[in-house]
Amino acid sequence: MDRRELGEFLRTRRERLRPADVGLPTGLRRRTPGLRREEVASLAAISTDYYARLEQARGPQPSRPVLSGIARALRLSDVERAHLFRLAGEQPGPAGPSPDVPSGIRHLLDRLDDAAAMVVDVKYEVLAWNPLAAVIFDDLFALPPRERNLARDRFLRPGTGRYPDTWEQFGINLASELRAAAAKYPDDPGLRELIEDLLAGSPEFRELWARHDVIGWRGRTKTLHHPRVGRFQVECEVLLVCDRDQRVILYTAEPGSPGHEALQLLKLLGTVAPAR
């Protein structure tokens, strides 16, 4: 662990940030550039004294969760985060699932006319969607961002009946995918909070989680239910955005099929719905 280099790195990263960058009020008097030490400590969920000692090159070796918290508080890039871990004598692991959808994927959503599409991260938090998906999943997308999650929807809002024919298998897939994500991103607080909420709120999830199953996602035919058009079948395919660890979920149907007709009708119903 290089305490001097670590302290200098933390100080320079702190001084480059403005309060507005992290959602804090600017205030009238700031004698130092950037954030205050106590502000970084609060954002990282550690004590001010502990963080100050790290900057002053006299602190203990920080743990991986502490380093992850500091990296988030200082808004470090993936490269900077890796550098921080190495200065602290740790090998950097994955930074955590990215919430930023690439512009090319957003352009793809804009151009999909006959398919419903959404982008999710490894927590199955919905990050973006196109107008047709907005019509089909309008009740889900109307929720606050934290609740706009397919796993929360599946296990904590079971009354939706969104996938009547594949409800059980969908739950198995989700529990398995979250198990793999937790192993890959052990320090991610959002993923940890999601799993804790599911374990506390869903006996079904607790049972599935205890199996320790890890299986890959497979495309399959799904039956969707919408109050305006009833039940209809679609093909569900998943495209991986590997550099962001995101998934583009596509719902399509063969032209001329009842499923395609249902999608066309829903598209007409949602012509004014904006893509997100």
Image: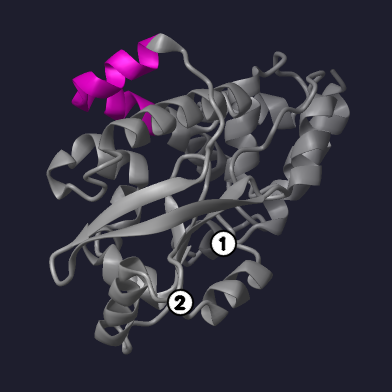
For label 2, the residue is 114
For label 1, the residue is 21
Residue 267, labelled with which disc? Answer: none
Query: Which residue lies at the image location 27% right of the left edge and 56% below the top edge?
Result: 224
Q: Which residues are magenta?
A: 193-210
Q: Secondary structure at mark 1?
A: helix
Q: In the image, 270: left or right of 219?
A: left
Q: Is residue 265 above or below residue 168?
A: below
Q: Secondary structure at mark 2?
A: loop
Q: Is residue 144 above or below residue 67?
A: below
Q: How many marks?
A: 2
At label 2, the amino acid type is: Asp
CA neighbours of label 1 inside 10 A, class few (<14), some (14 to 19), many (20+):
some
Query: Which residue lies at the image location 63% right of the left edge and 45% below the top edge?
Result: 245
Q: Nearer the viewer, mark 2 or mark 1?
A: 2
Image quadrant holding the N terminus, namely top right
**Membership of 194 in magenta stretch:** yes
Residue 20 percent location from the top left of the image = 52, 64
Q: Quadrant of residue 94?
A: top right
At label 1, the amino acid type is: Asp
Q: Is residue 193 visible?
A: no
**Membership of 37 in magenta stretch:** no
